[in-house]
Amino acid sequence: MPTTPQAIKRATDQETIAPLVELCKAGRLFDVQAWIAAGKPVNSPPPPDKGQRPRTPLEYAIDRGFHSLVQVLLEAGAVQEPEGYDAPIYQALRARRFDIVQLLVEHGFDPKAVDMHAVFCSWDPQIMDYFIERGAELQQGHPFASALCDRIRTALGRYKRCRERMPELQEQADIALRHHCKEGNLKWVSLMLWAGADPYNPGTENPGEELDEDDGGLSALGFAALYGHYEVFELKPIRSRPVGPAAAEMLLFLTRGKGLDILKRLLEKGLDPNDQESGGCSTIRSCLDGMSWARHYSPYAWERDAPKRSLDTSESRDKLKAIHLLAKHGAKWMPVDKREVDSARRSLLRLKPDYTIEFVWIMGKYQACTVECVNDLLRTPAMKSHTAAYRARLQEILALWS
């Protein structure tokens, strides 16, 4: 039976309990039984307000892994202290001693109060099942997600079984999938897909984290694209999966290097790139703004914007290729206000004039924006000077709208 606070019998001071501590350290079970039979206390005095807390006889018994010694102490009224992650239950979990865990629960520990992440960290399926069957908390703090992020393989089967009766656990698998897509761990990405995680469901990749209301997070594939783990997109469960509207949020991160091949594949499978309320494509806007970011190292500092040079980098060329792919598959550049056009113009002015000519040609060939937008882009003296050598070519391109 659990020991009630009123029944607790403590030593008056640490010196009184010291002999029992030494007996427990030595594992002298019969001497401990004699101590108890003599009516002597098994609990340490209250811990000091300051300084280090002396360890209790029960803690030393658990350290030794001596089941019978733990049992006789608990039956004699040993209190399960201290609280928190130094508590006897967590000692037993760290030692993976299911038999001692059972003793502690039988003598008063509430299995519903356990931190399930600590349970999963035991890697012991029997211990996991024991607490799950006794109603331990499986939602708060995302314990399954933490275990799966930590690659605790034995938790995976428990998740699958619990998911059948608790559909709300789905989000925890999604969190783990996002985490492994961010890390680029193909083995665990595959395992989480097998477990039914949704690669398109947005959210956090950190167990226990709550996103702000305005931050919907990224999908697992969004994290894979953002961190350049394009090999995730080659997995069979991903390639064979239908492309839905939720995939549009990752396009922004597929505008460089090998990401362009994935961008092309998604567009060819029918993904609509126009995700703005205006009917336009936010990725085109992002590419325009980002084309002029210089990515080279100066001995003195990183340089981002270099307005006095006409930039031409592999990244800026990739972004122009992305714009071409997007427009070819129906994407529209539909600026919502003058500031968006001004921002695009500033970016193009930092690049070689060829970029402006190519962009206008793409817009005309695929009718990806209105002629008014293009005229607004080209109207300023700075832009006219920038493209002066291509005036005749611009006139030919503008005729595409007629």
Image (cartoon, rainbow, N blue to C red):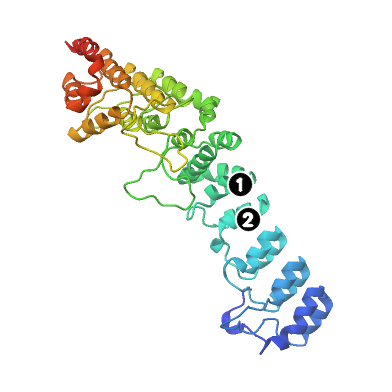
Q: Amino acid at mark 1?
A: Ala
Question: Can you say which quadrant of the picture contains the N terminus?
Answer: bottom right
Residue 390 point in image, percent of width and height: 25, 14
* Mark 1: few/some/many CA within 10 Å (<14, 14-19, 20+): many
- Could you say which is closer to the camera, residue 210 or residue 328? 328
User: Which residue is tagged 1?
Assistant: 155
Q: Residue 365, located in which quarter of the rendered image?
A: top left
Residue at image position (78%, 79%) is 22
Is residue 173 shown left or right of residue 400? right
Residue at image position (51%, 29%) is 230
Q: Is residue 280 visible?
A: yes
- Could you say which is closer to the camera, residue 306 or residue 185? 306
Real-space Cα separation, disc 1 to disc 2, in angstroms: 13 Å
- Could you say which is closer to the camera, residue 396 or residue 91? 396
Q: Is residue 184 above or below residue 84?
A: above
Label 2: which secondary element: helix
* Mark 2: few/some/many CA within 10 Å (<14, 14-19, 20+): some
Q: Amino acid at mark 2?
A: Tyr
Residue 64 point in image, percent of width and height: 77, 67
Residue 111 point in image, percent of width and height: 58, 62
User: Which residue is tagged 2?
Assistant: 130
